[in-house]
Image (cartoon, coloured by chain):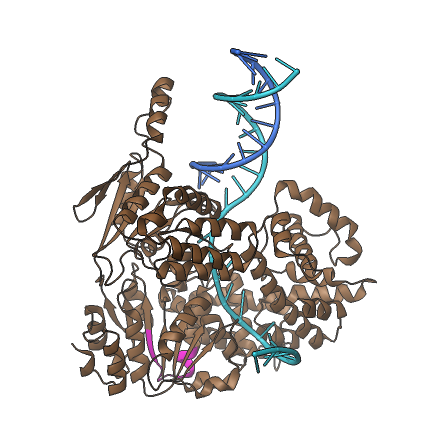
Chain colours: A brown, B cyan, C blue
Amino acid sequence: MRVRDLPLSSSVVDHFAERGVRELYPPQRAAVEAGVCGGADVVAAVPTASGKTFVAQLALLTAGGPGLYVCPLRALAREKYETFAALPGVDVGISTGDFDATGEELAGNDVVVATSEKVDSAIRNGASWVDELACVVVDEVHLLGAKRRGPTLEVTLATLRRRNPDLQTVALSATVDNPDAIADWLDAALVESDWRPVELRTGVAVGGDVAFDDGTSLSVDVASADEAARDDDEEVGVEKNEADGPDATEVTAALVADAVADGGQCLAFVRSRREAVDLAERLADEGLAEKLGIEDAAAAAADEATDVDGTLTGRQLADCLRAGVAFHHAGLRSGHRSVVESAFRDRDVACICATPTLAAGVNVPARRVVVRDQRRYGEAGMEWIPTLEVHQMCGRAGRPGLDPHGEAVLVADADTRAAVHERYVEGEPEAVESQLADPGALRTHVLAAVATGFAATETEILDVFEGTFYARETGAGGLADAVAVAVDDLVAAGMVARETGGVEDYRLVATAVGETTSKQYVRPETGERIVAGLRAAAGLSDATTLTAFEVICDTPDMQDTYLGNAERADVYRFARTNSAHLTTDMTEPDDFEGWLESVKTARILDEWIGGATVEDLVERYRIGPGDLDSRVERAEWLLSAAEALGETIGVRVPAVSRARSRL
DNA sequence: TGCCGGACCTTCTAGACAGCATGTC
DNA sequence: CTAGAAGGTCCGGCA
């Protein structure tokens, strides 16, 4: 099947031809046969890099009306915005929290790219363009299984489809265990495929020996440092059994060096941020830049990193980059992240050592992917990383047109080899499960349904949820009790009121506070905490910016910052000496630990507006530069929500405005 | 007395969405 | 209930 046979304008056909796209990939053909170009609802569960974006473009271009492309990450939204904007004759708009593109101007676009939260927010704020859509494409739908963000995805999609029954829905998913359930939910045709443009082989490494799933194998020389270690073991005797091979880090280093010697780039995934940095520094000694002959470009990338800031992290990154290596995790500022990402795409970096950020983020394909750690510290101690996640890491292997094939290597030892192979090489990815039943998620979406006027009774709320993945899987009835609880909670929180019209006949309406809470896109618990905080602050004789920060940092919408043992006493003392400026009685909070963390965050933010530098704060409070940035960003948002809430309850706290303007 | 090595203890752990008005190029 | 790596501390042995 050829591109020019599709119902596309000749300029669009030319556009694709210029990029070498003339023939459809098998999964793309299957999507066309399923009717993406004819307005049919389609779910495509295919690997990353198998041409999902093209399927999205087909749907959007042939929809005969405005289209919406929903994706989970702002960085992804920008990436897609650029590829769509390159299409001839297509007006594209972007709408994410960090990107200016105001309300009604989106109505004129052929395609709008947005995050799911932004779409949800647009609906809550009554944006008109969402009702005029002819087509919605949801990228990474499997994320509806995500704890916090999954529910908003499914409720948003359900609402969109309910308000616009003719809406064409195209959902793109990673390969998961139950794509049929998703297709069934959307009444869509299912296209399933594990075809990839570049062959991918996955293997398990024990010592320097890798056994791939296609029967091939590979041996790399692992540094001799571990030989000595093995001698030591013998002396100790039975203490350690000889099954313990060389160190996983050494194996990883050898695998990276091997790929680079062959002219290929590598991605190495590890468990924690610090280990990503450690690995990168360890690899910096290998002279990878020389092996790839990229010294000059690597030095240029290092200079770019240096220009971002003078943080310790920035200096470490620059040093690594100079040696042709980089690390990547969420503690990096976005400036550093994009330096690393673009340097890698330009082949100016041989290897990135990363936490899972990179697995789900922007496109950074490599010749070889090494997954050093398959277990990670989680809620229940050491947990196996979900198969889906590991597959997404592995899926980054293989650059179309550049690599003969992609290789994914899972580093194990003799003890774990079988388990790793079974779980990740043979094993199926997990099924996607709805998280809507979570009480917190339900509260916010029940409030949104009431505040927007879509529902005025519990029955109508259930109607809204009827189109949800949860309802299709479990039956909407399963939600009835939980919704009743959510309504009670919201009434108790002063977000929703029952307007009685008869004995059993009452209507649910959002209170003024409930309405602005929903429109400001904060969770009900956050709105409640802010309202209480504002009232308390108004009663304080000396409310300062610290007061404002304490209130917004004590909400579930502010991420908490780690409070080390050594710091605890210090923060406690800080809280005591500043108790006149805090809205919380120190003997009161039932979650004292959590509150102390909030105080720490508030203190950081207060010093930030007081003129402290990133370098200083990062060092003194042991947080990543990127963590500081994201907290500042959130504080701006929450302070504006606090201002709006203050206005609706008629309580003015000047310190809030002061804090906000100084941010 | 001073240095070094090792047993033992302590610390720490992935990621990232949202509002809005005003100023600036 | 379940881990494991890195860094710090303290003690003992040795020159």
Farthest right residue in view: A541
Residue at figure coordinates x 37%, y 54% from the top left: A349
Residue at figure coordinates x 75%, y 67% from the top left: A655
Residue A587 appears in view: no
Residue A642 location, quadrant: bottom right
Q: Residue A91's spot in the image, x, y percent?
A: 40, 85
**Against A499, is A581 above or below?**
above
Front-lying residue, A607 or A480? A607
Q: Residue A592's spot in the image, x, y percent?
A: 67, 49
**Against C13, is A242 above or below?**
below
**How many discs appear?**
0
Q: Is residue A437 shown left or right of residue A645?
A: left
Image quadrant in which the N terminus of chain A is located: bottom left
Q: Residue A140's spot in the image, x, y percent?
A: 36, 66
Does the magenta-highlighted stretch encompass residue A305?
no
Residue at figure coordinates x 45%, y 66% from the top left: A151
Residue A167 location, quadrant: bottom left
The residue range painted magenta reads A160-170
Front-lying residue, A492 or A590? A590
Does the magenta-highlighted stretch encompass residue A168?
yes
Residue A243 appears in view: yes
Front-lying residue, A415 or A465? A415
Q: Residue C4's spot in the image, x, y percent?
A: 43, 36
Front-lying residue, A626 or A146? A626
Image quadrant in which the C terminus of chain A is located: bottom right
Residue A159 location, quadrant: bottom left
Residue at figure coordinates x 78%, y 53% from the top left: A579
Q: Is residue A204 shown left or right of residue A578?
A: left
